Amino acid sequence: MATEAFEEIAETFEFLDDWEDRYRHVIELGRAMPPLDPVFQVPTFKVEGCASQVWLRPMIEGVGPGARFDFQGESDALIVRGLVAVLHALYGGLSVAEVTKVDAATELERLGLKDNLSAQRSNGVRAMVERIGRLAAEAAAG
């Protein structure tokens, strides 16, 4: 289950010949993402387990499993900011119940990230995915 925005990224990756082009595309996605206001770049929103500084601010509209999930994110590293944008494309706009059912590993594998990110970056993506899953599960529970 992937959003239309994520499908567009996956389709673009199919046309890019090598990882360097894909890497640049991920960075461009991050640059296009609206910045997170520094007032939200605080420990409450910081994602632990990332080599870079990463903040995810949940923005959930509604209550219970049908509540709409969205978030704003920021990182001090360009590639990680791009990975935040990729995750936003994967999860943004889904219901919190749908977010908990997304198989992020499978969806991200379609982009070839696992084979082309350092172990530290992969751990950071995993930490962000786990944080998003917890936020959605908490919101779904009410």
Image (tube, rainbow, N blue to C red):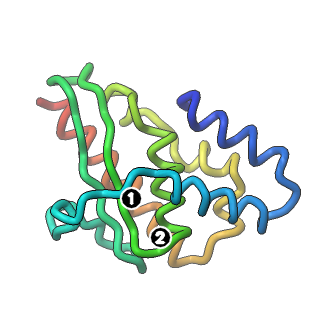
Quick one: which residue is furthest to the right in this view?
17
Q: Is residue 30 left or right of residue 28?
A: left
Q: Earlier in the sequence, mark 2 or mark 1?
A: 2
Establish if 124 lies above or below 141.
below
Disc 1: which residue: 128
What is the spatial separation of the Cα atoms under label 2 and label 1, in whole angstroms?
9 Å
Residue 126 percent across, percent down from the top left: 45, 61
The three-letter amino acid code for the residue at tag 1 is Met
- Binning the other alpha carbons within 10 Å of mark 1 as few (below 14), some (14 to 19) or many (20 upward) gives many
Q: Which residue is denoted by mark 2 in the rendering?
A: 123
Identity of the residue drawn at 24% across and 24% down: 67
Residue extending farthest left: 142
Q: Does dot 2 land on a helix, a strand or a loop? A: helix
Q: Image quadrant for the N terminus?
A: top right
Q: Secondary structure at mark 1?
A: helix
Find residue 62 and report its horizontal and vertical position in percent: 17, 23
